[in-house]
Amino acid sequence: MTALEQYERLESLGLWRATRSEQRREVLVSFGKATLIVSDMADRPLTHWSLPAVERVNPDSMPAVFRPGPDAGESLEIDDETMVDAIEAVRGSIARAEAKPGRLRYWISAAILTAGIGAGAVWGPGLLRDQALLATPDARRAELGARILGHMQAQTGAICRSRGGLVALDRMRARLLGPDAPGQTVVLPAPLPGPVLLPGQITVINRAVLVRYDDPAVVAGEILAAKANTTDPLRAVLNFAGLRATVHLMTTGDLPPGTLADYAASLIEKPQAVTSEQALLQAFASVGVPSAPYADLRTARGQNAALLLTQSPDAGTPPSPILTDSEWIQLQGICDA
C-alpha cells in the first residue's frame, strides 16, 4: 500500500489564506491523487495544490503552515497532527518515487511500453488515445489539470487571488460561460503565449492581458478562445506525451513521472492550437460581446484578425456590459495582493 492509498480518504479542517493580506477562513482539506484539495465548508473546491510542490513553512512547529510553492502568498494552517503527518508522508513518498523509480517500476514501465507498442501496431495511436480519453473520468481530468497548473505556478509564481479580482473574474466567467459552467478560470502573474485550457476545464490567462489592454472584451476573448478550441485538453496532453504515456494512462490511471511538468513548461514557451476566427466569431456572437477589441491582441501575436474587426457581432447595436467599471478595475488588480 502506498502512502497515498493509506491516507486518500483522510480529511481535516484547516485555515486557508488566499493572499497574505486576506483573513484566514475555515476550509476542508483532503487528498487527490497527487494534489491537496482545499474546499469550502459546502465541499466546493477552492484550490488544488500540487503535492510535490507543497512546502512546509514551519517544520518544527504546530499548527503546521503549508504553502503551494516558493514565495507563494497562499497558505494553509493545519493543527490536525494526523493530517500533517499524512501530508509529510505523501509528499516524501511522491518525491522518492519520482527521484528513484526502482527496479520494479522499471519492469512495469517496460511491460506497459511493450504492450503499448503491440496495441499501437494493431489499433493505431489515434484509437489508443480515443480509448484513453473515454476511460478517464472528469474527476481524474480535474486532478491532472490541477497538477499541470501546479507545475506552471512553480515557474510563473502562484495564481493571482485578490478578493475583489476573484469576484470580478467569477462574474465574467459566469457571464461568458454560464453560472453553472464546470471548471475554473485563473490568472498567472507571468506572460504566456496565449490562453491555455487544461484538463478539468481550467482556463489559464495571464496578467499582461489585463494591464496592457484597457477593455474587458480582450480578456473575454482569451476565455472564449480557450473554450472555443475544439481539441480536448487531455488529448493535447497525450499528443504531446506520446504513445507510452497514453498506454500508461490507460493501464494505471496516471501519466509517467515528469510528463506533466514537461507539458507545463511547453505551455509557457509556446501557445496551444490557435482558435479559428470563425469559431471565435461564433463564440463572441453567442454571448453578445464585441470581437473587434480582441483583434488587437490577435494581431500582436501574429494571428489572423481581419474577420474579428470587420464582422464584430456588436455592429450597429450597443453591447451589454461584460463588467461594470468598478468590477473591471478590480479584475485588473487581481495580482495586486
Image (spheres, helix red, strand yellow):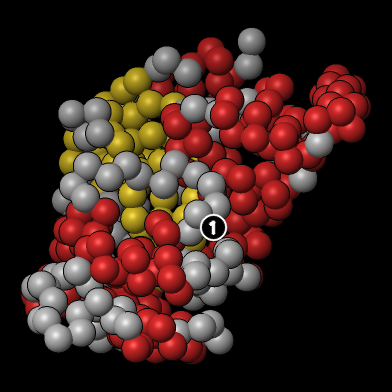
**Residue 5 x, y percent position in the rendering:** 55, 15
In what quadrant of the picture does the C terminus appear? bottom left
Residue at mark 1: 152
Circle 1: element type: helix
Quick one: 16 or 63, which is closer to the camera?
16
**In this view of the protein, can residue 258 be seen by the observer?**
no
Q: As shown in the figure, which amino acid type bears the numbered disc 1?
A: Met
For the point 34% across and 88% down, which residue is it?
310
* In the depicted structure, whether residue 265 falls above or below residue 48: below
Residue 70, given in percent of the width and then of the height, sits at: 50, 57
Q: In this view, does 70 lie to the left or right of 46?
A: right
The quadrant in which the N terminus is found is top right
Give residue 330's quadrant in the image.
Answer: bottom left
Q: Which residue is drawn at 61% across and 45% down?
A: 235
Residue 316 seen in render: yes
Horizontal and vertical percent position of residue 300: 49, 89
At x 53% / y 82%, what residue is drawn? 303
